Amino acid sequence: MRKIIHIDMDAFFASVEQRDDKSLQGKPIAVGSSGKRGVISTASYEARKYGIRSAMPSQIAIKKCPELIFVPPRYDVYKSVSNQIRQIFLEYTDLVEPLSLDEAYLDVTTNFKNIPFAIDVAKEIKDRIFQTTQLTASAGVSINKFLAKIASDYNKPNGLFIIGPKKAEKFVESLPIEKFFGIGEKTAIKMHQMNIFTGKDLKERSEEFLITNFGKSGKTYFLNARAIDNRAVVSNRQRKSLGVEWTFTEDVSSLLQVENELIAICEELANRIAKSKFKGRTISLKLKLEDFSILTRSKTLPNDIEEFSVLVESSKEMLNQIELKQKIRLIGVSVKASESVGEVYEVDRQMMIPFEEDRG
Ligand code: TTP
Ligand code: MG
């Protein structure tokens, strides 16, 4: 039986800002820009009471809470806090798998301090995080990643929740399917139409049924419904892809303007590929259209993609094959990793939304 902990900082960017500026404490704040195209990275718990959430357009947030205070992001500070908490994790185990700046799985089945109960490791880590950073984290403890992550979310903020081996199956039965790993909005709707609302409903369906209807994920749902998740905690994850994208200040229809931006994006991407020594052969072009729908095209080349000229050529070719019926809101190019290359995982997700905004 494994002992897995999932740690997730509370309202991470916002808590850092409130920590460093007393005048923001106890107030509804959002990290991001209030501009016309601004999107919120995260909101303080005070702001969440108004229904403000990550990824929400700032203009909508202001309508919900006119006194909302906007704070620009300071990634270097978040990154250094992220390093501080990572150092704490590494005092307990080598098996640390970061998912983003503020979140990680730890396998503490055996741990450097020989602490027998995982819940005690989690308590200690939470305390150490608070002493070191003056920030709170929530921790979930369980027998696998799937349940540990659900547990950390259970008593947020400053939560500590354990789903022990004996209670795991019952717990999963009562879980709404939206909480299952990999079940997003679309899949949830499909499941509801099949009268699947809880883990129990899911468990009553056969493996064949789930695979027929949900493909490979069906197998995962089948196992998870039985509280099984055999994924290992993997340290030093491989970076899966490297990409650059850009949101236009105004939606554009001019192909020339799109191509010019594509060139700038490929330049930036080529720089990043060179810096990180990233290796990949599959290049993808992504377009977000004015109705927010997303179009992607991919192409795999015979060799690792390094050069700017190759990036531009391939992405232009893909762009030209698309028949555009709408204006373009966002354009992005990314390269996917070749299977066998080892590259330390870096965190990009948080950077995405504000990054677009910074440039926009
Ligand atoms: P989360 O852990 O998802 O959120 P959170 O820490 O703000 O709040 P919670 O207490 O619910 O854990 O993400 C961590 C940080 O990543 C968050 O502070 C800001 C950033 N982020 C974005 O920039 N965009 C996003 O869409 C999300 C979800 C997070
Ligand atoms: Mg968090």
Image (spheres, helix red, strand yellow):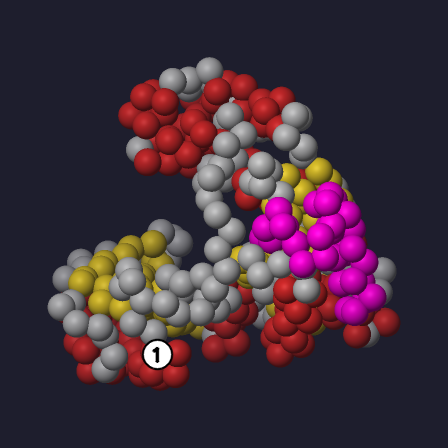
Q: Decide if residue 332 is on the left or right side of residue 228.
A: left
- Res. 146 image quadrant: top right
Where residue 35 sits in the image (x, y, percent)? 58, 70
Q: Amino acid at mark 1?
A: Lys
Residue 250 vs 339, above or below: the answer is below
- Res. 294 image quadrant: bottom left
Task: Report if residue 278 lies within the magenta region.
Answer: no
Q: What's the residue at 29%, 55% (across, down)? A: 295
Q: What residue is shown with label 1? A: 277
Judging depth in this view, the residue of 249 and 132 nearest the camera is: 132
Q: Which residues are magenta?
A: 105-134
Tell me if I can see residue 48 in this picture.
no
Where residue 195 sits in the image (x, y, percent)? 47, 18
Where residue 74 sits in the image (x, y, percent)? 64, 76
The residue positioned farthest toward the top in the image shown? 204
Judging depth in this view, the residue of 131 and 30 nearest the camera is: 131
